[in-house]
């Protein structure tokens, strides 16, 4: 079976999961963190090397202040409580998104997690936090524009490959599979550049209910897809 090296997940539906149970949204996000833990534990055994999760988007700031603060608190708690286990299990933590827009204590915590786990190789857990695909592309374009303006590079030298090297994911291969839970059928500004050729799997379950079996099913679905990257299927090449 062909397994994607990199799986990216839009963890959607925490709020609706909580509402269906008459619970506050925070309870849904807490259950979401638990689902994330289980997914991280399951990923290496399923042959996944990179797992990217959309934890807080650059648009999530528009939510009520209390929910934004809850999500910041949960991230801190997750790093504080789980970092030792992640490190012990050989998980490398990488953050993508605009760190500059985060509070200094959160930034420090994220930096610490990245530094501590830098050499781990069993799984790279990429946490997209204060992340937006358009924002990432704009930041990359600014970096390259500054390099052109200073004469460091010529604008003709900017290829798609070079552009990708200016993104937050410079050292991370593109995701082959993007999964979104909760039944919504869109990318919501997630990995816009990197997901250009990704296979998409949309699941009806809310994120807190996501399990190892859902992940294994999505991998089976992926394995059955024919990926052409704009080319032709092998059986049609000679026709
Ligand atoms: C979408 O559900 C989920 C989020 C905006 C945040 C995802 C966060 C977690 C899984 C927990 C936090 C994880 C870390 C590492 C801090 P929603 O709130 O949009 O749900 P809804 O669409 O049903 O309202």
Image: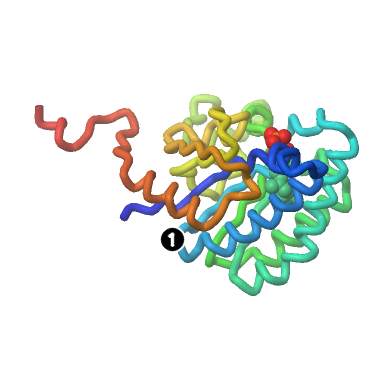
Q: Residue at x 57, y 42 (%)?
A: 205
**Nearest the camera: 55 or 101?**
55
Q: Is residue 135 above or below residue 117?
A: above
In percent of width and height, residue 218 lies at 44, 47
Ligand 1, what quadrant? top right
In percent of width and height, residue 232 lies at 23, 30
Q: In this view, does 225 lie above or below 133?
A: below
- Tell me the quarter of the picture where residue 166 sits: top right
**Nearest the camera: 127 or 35?**
35
Residue 144 visible in rendering: no
* Residue 46 as seen in the image, left or right of residue 72: left
The quarter of the picture where the C terminus appears is top left
In percent of width and height, residue 224 lies at 31, 44
Q: Residue at x 58, y 30 (%)?
A: 184
Residue to which mark 1 is pinned: 47
In percent of width and height, residue 139 lies at 68, 32
Q: In this view, does 108 lie above or below 17?
A: below
Q: Is residue 43 above or below residue 10?
A: below
- Tell me the quarter of the picture where residue 231 sits: top left
Q: Residue at x 43, y 61 (%)?
A: 47
The quarter of the picture where the N terminus appears is bottom left
Q: Does the residue labelled 1 lie within 8 Å of ligand 1?
A: no
Number of other residues with Cα within 10 Å of mark 1, as a class: few under 14, some 14 to 19, many 20 or more:
some
Q: Is mark 1 on a helix, strand or loop?
A: loop
Q: Which residue is drawn at 58% across and 48% down?
A: 52
Q: Which residue lies furthest to the bottom in this view?
A: 88
**Nearest the camera: 21 or 127?**
21
């Amino acid at each position: 079976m062909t397994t994607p090296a990199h799986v990216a997940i839009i963890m959607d539906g925490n709020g609706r999961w909580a509402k269906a149970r008459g619970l506050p949204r925070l309870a849904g996000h807490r259950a979401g963190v638990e689902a994330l833990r289980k997914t991280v534990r399951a990923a290496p055994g399923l042959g996944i090397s990179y797992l990217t999760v959309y934890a807080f988007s650059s648009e999530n700031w528009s939510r009520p202040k209390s929910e934004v603060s809850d999500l910041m608190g949960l991230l801190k708690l997750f790093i504080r409580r789980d970092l030792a286990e992640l490190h012990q299990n050989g998980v490398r933590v990488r953050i993508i998104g605009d760190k500059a827009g985060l509070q200094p204590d959160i930034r420090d915590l994220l930096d610490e997690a990245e530094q501590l786990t830098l050499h781990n190789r069993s799984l790279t857990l990429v946490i997209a936090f204060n992340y937006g695909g358009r924002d990432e592309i704009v930041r990359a374009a600014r970096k390259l524009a500054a390099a052109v303006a200073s004469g460091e590079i010529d604008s003709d030298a900017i290829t798609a490959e070079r552009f990708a090297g200016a993104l937050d994911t410079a050292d991370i291969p593109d995701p082959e599979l993007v999964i979104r839970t909760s039944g919504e059928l869109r990318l919501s500004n997630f990995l816009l550049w990197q997901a250009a050729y990704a296979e998409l799997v949309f699941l009806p379950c809310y994120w807190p209910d996501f399990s190892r079996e859902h992940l294994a099913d999505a991998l089976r679905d992926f394995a059955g897809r024919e990926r052409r990257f704009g080319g032709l299927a092998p059986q049609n090449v000679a026709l």
